[in-house]
Every structure is written in structure tokens, then in C-alpha cells.
Amino acid sequence: MKKELHYLTLLLLVILVSCGTQKGDTEDKAASETSESAAEAIEQAPMDIKGEEVTYEADSISMNGFIAYNAGQTGTRPGILVVHEWWGHNDYARKRAKMLAEMGYVALAVDMYGDGLQADHPEDAGKFSSAVFQNLDGAKARFLKAMEVLKGNPATDSTKIAAIGYCFGGGVVLHAARFGFPLAGVVSFHGSLDTATPAAEGDIKAAILVCHGADDPFVSTESVEGFKKEMADAGANLTFKAYEGAKHSFTNPDADTVGQKFELPLAYNEAADKASWEDMKVFFDGIFDN
């Protein structure tokens, strides 16, 4: 019997060696299992999404934000800033903040206009958004204050902060990256790409994901190519996704109604909406090592 056990032991050792089970492989497997365990812990955490109104001041203006997180989840987690469309801080921005909270993040839907200002007409939206970009010092102060508020939430891991933005908000987060703000990454959904202050080499610290509608009439081919060149010259870590058939505001289910009302070329695209959200998830997994 002892002899048989001895042979079985030798056979097992041979199999382990032949399969390449060495220290490095074991450590890699353990790290992978730890990562998977952390992800599973988030998925298995009780879903108790809390949404809280937050008020903060910057640029001599009061800002009305909305922070969302899963109260059923323990420990700290990465924080995501959500920057609204040119319509202002509305239910759509809050909806996205809640979706991020369901994924295991702390999300702050920011107020870039101040006082919770919202536009009901494109002319007003254009005025509000233009005023922000014409006052870049003020825009920086508003964004950085929102980041400070997000970092101050007890559930937020202050060392892991990113930002996403839609349309106007997409332009805002890309400018935040250009300014070299301490962000792990930014994601622009059908956002503006042009800038009067292009980034120089070494300016951009954040990884960048651009989710672009290939048929967006508001963003020209020249703008796309110019943006890609700017990012290449700056040495940015850029991922650029273009979704075929997608027009402006392709992530917003209300885009068709608004487009028809104001005769604007806006259209929701369910396939592009889902694909871009999945691309964002992969992007976040990469920058946060989830």
C-alpha cells in the first residue's frame, strides 16, 4: 500500500510539473481569484441605492448636485463624476449616476451651470453651455469643487476618481483631461471634441475613452481627425469608439422626441447606447484594476 501511495505521489508531482505549475503561475492565479472575488463581492452586495442631494459652492455660485451609491456595499469604492448634457443637471444625469451606483461606484451628478439651472429650449442651452466654456477658470473651479465633494463621501476611494459626460458634458470631461486634472480616466459620450486650448505633450494624465456616433452631424470628420492628432501629439492614452448609424445624443431615449420638437438631428440608438456602456465598463475595469 505504501509503495502504491509513493507511485501516486510521484505521478502527481510529474503532472504538476508538466502543467507548468510554478510559483509565478500560482501567484497570478491567486491574484486573478482575488480580483474575481472582489468583483463577485460587489455583485452579491445587497442592492440599496441611495440618492442624496448635495449643495456646494464654487466660482461664487451655488451648485446643486446629486450623489448615488449602494448603501448595501461595504468598504470604499471608486468615484465617478457625471457631467450633464447642455440641457443642465436633470433626471437623465441622475439616472446615469444611479446606474453607476448599481455597478458598485459612488457617482456624483454635477451641476456645471449653478443653482440647478436647466434649459427648456436649445437657444438657452446654447447660451448656458457657451458661458461655461468662455469662462474656463470658472469651469475649472466648478469641476474641481465637485471632485472634492465626491472624494469627501465616506464611501469613496479618493485615490480612484474618474468622470463621464454627455454632449456638453463630454466636452467638459475632455477639457478636464486636457487640464491635467488628477483623474484616472474620462469617458465622453457623443461629446464635443474641439478646443481652443489644445493639450501639449505630457499635459494629459487621465486615460480617455471617446464614445462617438459615426453619423453625428454636429461633429465633423475634420474635428474627429483633429482631435485624434491632438491626443497623439499630447501622448494621451486614447481609445476612440465610433458606432455605426449612431447620431447625436444616441444614449438618451428622449433624443427622438426632443429632436422632433426642435427640428434637431438627434436620435436614440439602443444598440450604440448599450455598446458604449459596455465599452465604458471595460474601460473602468482597466483603469481601476477591478
Image (cartoon, rainbow, N blue to C red):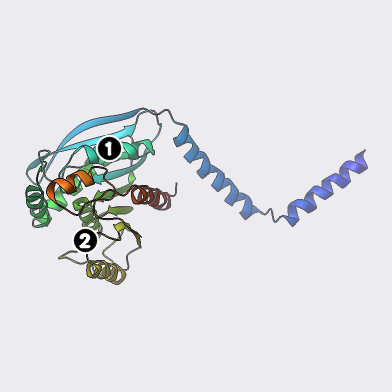
Which residue in the structure is indicated by mark 2? 217
In the image, residue 28 above or below residue 204? above
> x, y (%) of residue 186?
30, 53
Name the quadrant containing residue 119: top left
Mark 2 falls on what kind of element? loop
Mark 1 falls on what kind of element? helix
- Of the residues shown, which amino acid type is indicated by label 1? Lys
> x, y (%) of residue 210?
31, 58
Mark 1, Cα crowd under 10 Å, few <14 / some 14-19 / many 20+, is few
For this rendering, which residue is in front, 198 or 274? 274
- Of the residues shown, which amino acid type is indicated by label 2? Pro
Q: Which mark is residue 95?
A: 1
First reached walking from the N terminus: tag 2 or tag 1: 1
Whether residues under marks 2 and 1 lie with C-beta atoms below 8 angstroms apart, the answer is no
Q: CA distance from mark 2 to mark 1?
A: 26 Å
Q: Residue at 64% across / 53% down in the picture?
A: 23
Does any portion of residue 187 appear in the rendered image? Answer: yes
> x, y (%) of residue 85?
19, 47
> x, y (%) of residue 53?
20, 31
Q: Quadrant of the N terminus?
A: top right
For this rendering, which residue is in front, 124 or 194? 124
Does any portion of residue 154 appear in the rendered image? Answer: no
